[in-house]
Amino acid sequence: MALSYKTRKRLALAILMLGVPLYIVVAVTVVGWFERPGFLVELLIYIILGVIWAFPLKAVFKGIGQPDPDA
């Protein structure tokens, strides 16, 4: 079942306001558990973690910036 535009917009806002900050805290905590790698390796880890969260949520964010198609 496809989500309505209004539902996807609210879900996207909730993800951006609550989910992403929580994901950042978890990512920094998990990376902190290990011995600190070199600067470039650590930068690469954060870049990968910074991009990978969006792939499973692509369907939620797709078309959110467009006008409501049902209006």
Image (spheres, rainbow, N blue to C red):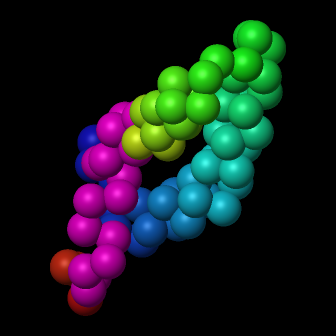
Q: Is residue 52 left or right of residue 24?
A: left
Q: Residue 34 location, x and y as percent? A: 74, 11
34 vs 26: above or below: above
Query: In which quadrant of the rendered view does residue 25 lie?
Result: top right
57 within the magenta span: yes
> As drawn, which residue projects farthest toward the top?
34
Q: Nearer the viewer, residue 37 or 15?
A: 37
Quarter of the image with the C terminus in it: bottom left
Q: Is residue 53 visible?
A: no
Quarter placement of the N terminus: top left
Q: Residue furthest left?
A: 69
Residue at 51 percent of width and 31 percent of height: 40
In-image side of 2 versus 42 (left or right): left
Identify the main secondary structure in magenta.
Answer: loop
Quick one: 65 or 25, which is closer to the camera? 25
Q: How many marks?
A: 0
User: Residue 4 at what x, y percent from top left?
Assistant: 34, 62
Relative image position of residue 46 (x, y in whole percent): 55, 36
Q: Position of residue 6 (x, y in %)?
A: 42, 71
Q: Is residue 65 visible?
A: yes
Q: Residue at x 64, y 47 (%)?
A: 19
Q: Is residue 50 above or below residue 3?
A: above
Residue drawn 73% across the image and 19% down it: 36
Q: Is residue 63 above or below residue 49?
A: below
Asked whether 36 falls inside the magenta stretch, the response is no
Residue located at (27% from left, 59% from top): 62
Start and end of the magenta stretch?
52-68
